[in-house]
Image (spheres, coloured by chain):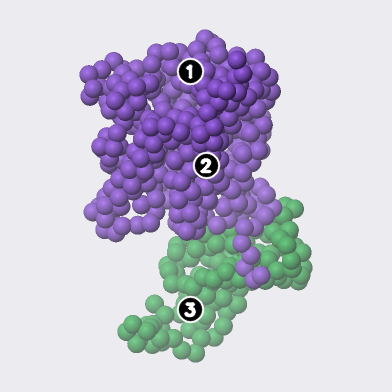
Chain colours: A purple, B green
């Protein structure tokens, strides 16, 4: 039987397109973060994001994909698919029966690339470039790959336990968010940080980035259906609804508590909503997505505006406050709102008569959190021992663009 | 009344500003400029980092002060801006003939604040 007869061209076209959408989220993230930092550091953000595309694309095809998705009961995936050996056009039914195996590889690659890039927000404006390169390589291999395997890989223990993570609320957002918190604490605060964020140098860039993220997120969530079908449509719909709800909620919260609705607030809220709905997007309907949108906006707002200034840690661009917290909330919400009526391939949650699902979600988040926390800490220490983590004070004052890359982003006279 | 104009390295700006605040000088105007000194701009900004072209980025501060604040202002600026390397900058002290506060139309020493 010719395997190619099993390939559905509609599914494949959609997955390829979705992969391209998720790809675009990394440059989108670059502008989102880049606009939020001071002018003298914008290139360092763009460089870190862009080079992640290069480093991690290679890591993925050489061994990352295998460590994530090669069937294995162990700590991480098998080594049999190194260099994509044995990974061809025939579908691999553990993941999808209707698209070429390599299409799945390409799609998942984009997730693996953006996850370490999310952490950039926590150590922005003070991380050494050489340290960054080693960090993302080690983190992708030893933190992302195992966690991805546990939750999505064939033989992964959380997947076997029935944990639901449709598009990566835990694998990507909670994971990166917790790692972000660790890096912020290990690196320490930026010089002159007075528990208040520095003004963004280019809010229009940040808005552009947020728009690209929202756009790409349709690929992130709806693409995770791995097919052009009802589940994909549902994911698309609830993704948009949660983002819209969260953006509006944050804007209203700011209006009430800070007196004015701001651009930065609206885009932050929308991104929080997108991260929050990710895990649930293939399992919940519109009404739960609105509830999730409101809740993540509220919790992230409190985390960023109240708790962070009080505790005084410098998570520069709120990688933990927005991605981490909303990812965790989304994972828990999935345990409440998941419904087989939306996706027969999923499970029912607490509100649909299955409290066990909530327990599974909590175990999954807990394991991810502990592993990400400890593992990221160890990796930071290793990188520190190898090349050092933080730039010197003088380099930080001059700016990373000039000190790390010998480039200025904007000229003054010409 | 005097007008103090200082051209300093951009990365010393925060230090200079804090020193001025400490000296009770809170009123100033800041702009970003390009410039060079005797080295014609080839002087290095930072170990090995040469900016493209002859002109280097600098920050210009303009501070109007009463006579008794001239020395504190100059001292504060030097304290914040001096690194001992080429490109530290210059301070010019100009005579100021008149000064007005627009909102209240006060003039003279009172307007300088």
* Disc 3 secondary structure class: strand
Eyeballing the image, is A210 above or below B111?
Answer: above
Q: Given the image, what chain letter belongs to the residue carrying mark 2? A: A
> How many other residues sit within 10 Å of disc 3, few (<14), some (14-19) or many (≥20)?
many
Residue sitting nearer the eye, A176 or A351:
A351
Residue at x 60%, y 77% (from the top left corner): B92
Q: Which image quadrant for residue A319?
A: top left
Whether residue A181 appears in this view of the structure is no
Task: Tell me the tag on residue A150.
Answer: 1
Q: Given the image, what chain letter belongs to the residue carrying mark 3? A: B
Q: How far is mark 1 from mark 3, CA to CA?
A: 66 Å
Eyeballing the image, is A117 above or below A71?
Answer: below
Task: Tell me the tag on residue A81.
Answer: none
Residue at x 57%, y 23% (from the top left corner): A5
| Quarter the C terminus of chain B occupies | bottom left
Q: How far is mark 1 from mark 2, CA to CA?
A: 25 Å
Residue A367 percent across, percent down from the top left: 42, 19
Q: Which residue is mark 2?
A: A21
Residue sitting nearer the eye, A168 or A373:
A168
Q: How far is mark 3 from mark 2, CA to CA?
A: 55 Å
> How many other residues sit within 10 Å of disc 2, few (<14), some (14-19) or many (≥20)?
many
* Disc 2 secondary structure class: helix
Is there a contact, CB below 8 Å, between mark 1 and mark 2?
A: no
Q: Are marks 1 and 3 on the same chain?
A: no
Residue A398 percent across, percent down from the top left: 61, 54
Residue at x 52%, y 9% (from the top left corner): A73
Residue sitting nearer the eye, A340 or A208:
A340
Q: Are marks 1 and 2 on the same chain?
A: yes
Task: Tell me the tag on residue B64.
Answer: 3
Q: Nearer the N terminus, badge 1 or badge 2?
A: 2
């Amino acid at each position: 039987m010719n395997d190619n007869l099993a390939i559905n061209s509609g599914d494949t076209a959609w997955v390829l397109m979705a992969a391209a959408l998720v790809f675009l989220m990394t440059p989108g993230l670059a502008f989102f973060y880049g606009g939020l930092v001071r002018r003298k550091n914008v290139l360092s953000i763009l460089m870190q994001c862009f080079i992640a595309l290069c480093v991690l694309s290679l890591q993925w095809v050489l061994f990352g994909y295998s460590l994530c998705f090669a069937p294995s009961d162990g700590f991480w995936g098998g080594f049999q698919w190194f260099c994509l050996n044995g990974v061809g056009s025939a579908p691999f039914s553990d993941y999808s029966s209707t698209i070429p195996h390599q299409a799945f590889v390409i799609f998942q690659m984009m997730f693996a690339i953006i996850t370490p890039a999310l952490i950039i927000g926590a150590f922005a404006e003070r991380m050494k470039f050489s340290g960054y390169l080693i960090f993302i390589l080690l983190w992708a291999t030893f933190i992302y790959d195992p966690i991805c395997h546990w939750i999505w890989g064939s033989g992964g223990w959380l997947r076997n336990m029935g944990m639901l993570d449709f598009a990566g609320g835990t694998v990507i957002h909670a994971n990166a968010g917790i790692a972000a918190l660790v890096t912020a604490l290990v690196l320490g605060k930026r010089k002159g940080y007075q528990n208040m964020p520095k003004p963004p140098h280019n809010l229009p860039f940040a808005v552009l980035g947020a728009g690209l993220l929202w756009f790409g997120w349709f690929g992130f969530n709806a693409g995770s259906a791995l097919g052009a079908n009802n589940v994909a449509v549902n994911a698309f719909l609830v993704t948009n609804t949660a983002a819209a709800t969260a953006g509006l909620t944050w804007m209203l919260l700011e209006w009430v508590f800070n007196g004015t609705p701001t651009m930065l607030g609206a885009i932050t809220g929308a991104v929080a909503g997108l991260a929050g709905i990710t895990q649930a997007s293939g399992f919940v309907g519109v009404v739960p997505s609105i509830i999730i949108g409101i809740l993540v906006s509220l919790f992230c707002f409190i985390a960023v505006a109240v708790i962070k200034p009080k505790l005084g840690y410098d998570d520069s661009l709120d990688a933990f406050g927005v991605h981490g917290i909303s990812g965790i909330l989304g994972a828990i919400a999935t345990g409440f709102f998941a419904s087989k009526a939306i996706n027969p391939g999923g499970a029912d949650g607490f509100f649909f008569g299955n409290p066990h699902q909530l327990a599974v979600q909590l175990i999954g988040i807990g394991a991810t959190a502990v592993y990400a926390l400890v593992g990221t800490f160890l990796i930071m220490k290793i990188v520190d021992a190898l090349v050092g983590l933080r730039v010197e004070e003088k380099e930080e004052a001059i700016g990373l663009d000039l000190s790390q890359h010998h480039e200025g982003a904007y000229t003054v006279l010409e | 009344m005097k007008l103090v104009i200082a051209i300093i390295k951009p990365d010393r700006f925060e230090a200079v500003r804090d020193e001025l605040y400490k000296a009770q000088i809170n009123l100033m105007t800041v702009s970003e400029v390009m410039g060079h000194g005797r080295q014609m701009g080839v002087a290095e900004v930072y170990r090995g980092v040469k900016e493209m072209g002859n002109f280097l980025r600098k920050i210009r501060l303009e501070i109007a002060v009463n006579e008794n604040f001239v020395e504190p202002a100059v001292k504060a600026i030097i304290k914040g801006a001096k690194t001992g390397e080429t490109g530290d900058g210059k301070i010019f002290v100009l005579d100021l003939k008149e000064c007005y506060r627009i909102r209240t139309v006060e003039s003279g020493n009172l307007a300088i604040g």
